Image (tube, rainbow, N blue to C red):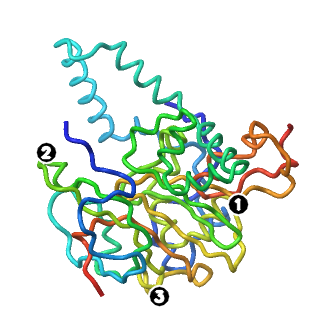
Amino acid sequence: MGDTQIQNRFPFTTTTEAIAHGDGHGHAHDHPQPQERPPSPEDDPEVMYWDRRTEGIANLLIRKGYFTADGVRREIERIEARTPMLGARVVAKAWTDPAFKARLLKDAKAACTELGIDVSAVNHLTVLENTERVHHAVVCTLCSCYPRPLLGEPPWWYKSTAYRNRVVVSPRRVLAESFGTTLPEDIELRVVDSTADSRFLVLPRRPAGSEGWSQEDLMKLVTRDSMVGVSEVLSPAEVAR
Amino acid sequence: MATRGTAGTRHTVATRYPVGGRVRVAETIRPGHIRTPLFLLGKRGEIAALQGEFLSPEQMAYHEEGPPIPLYLVAFEAGEVWGGQVPRADRGFKIYAELYEDWLSPL
């Protein structure tokens, strides 16, 4: 299955050894070329095994009448219909409505529900506000926890061993070399690991030059990656209103 | 089906650590399904927030039921977690992770 949401190629190998030896730079001289496509899960014998097992169990349950093939398809369709536009709506609303932003930072699930976004699938939702002083980047070092009700399915690099291992060791370098995001030296960088019940959404900084924009126009500035904290939002000059 | 824990600000269980409190993560892992990253074992951190109370994933993984456990967002200095292994350009960042109260002890 192709991932249509890929915005960033992830040029890292899956080893973390290079970090300890101070050689973790991502450019290509004397190094293997970056992967041209995400590793296809279907190529992995272990994934093949689990795929077949899942299919076998699903077919049995369908035959026994617990659910239908169409029911499974509908559920997959529902899951895959969620896109980062939902998160962008939340961010644009927070940028333009200080009272909403205060509610969002205090109880993010309630604030999203207010906007008609179904976040019932997560136990707890925490919104992390980026400011001039603090920048947040989100990872799940254990698996692939991600604020799916707001951003949809995670991009492949978010699930990669390379990102998960490296961003908690050398985050400035990962952000700079893999995502082209150079943070000011004096900013406090917080890497937030989704280890338990909360899912984390970054509330990026509103860019200068977007004063007076409508929520609908502001949404165009808010990218998926900016809500994971690996990039800033687009600049107003990049977006047609 | 049991509810998967209460989120939010109301708490029925007394919590052991205040925001700003210093804690240490347990030094040894436990058998079974755990949600504590191994790189944080034995590390010292500071309570950044109380996230709520949630059923223990260690029990839920085996269909056991227990009382909800307070869950904290805990902040760790990169130097505390990795020592001298952090590349120079990266010194000074913080790692935040959610940890259940029974993995923490006071400092």
Write down the residue under mark 2: B63
Mark 2 surroundings: few (<14), some (14-19) or many (≥20) residues within 10 A: few
Point 52% across, 66% down: residue:
A167
> How much space separates mark 2 and mark 3, taking CA atoms?
41 Å
Amino acid carrying label 1: it is Gly
Q: In the image, residue B59 lies at what x, y percent?
A: 16, 53
- Chain letter for the residue marked with disc 2 in the picture: B
Image vertical order of residue A74 relative to residue A198, above or below: above
Q: In the image, residue B6 lies at what x, y percent?
A: 31, 50
Q: In the image, residue A65 lies at what x, y percent?
A: 20, 12
Amino acid carrying label 3: it is Gly
Image vertical order of residue A17 relative to residue A73, above or below: below
Q: Which mark is residue B84?
A: 3
Element on which disc 3 rests? helix
- Between B66 and A62, the residue placed more toward the observer is B66
Element on which disc 1 rests? loop
Amino acid carrying label 2: it is His
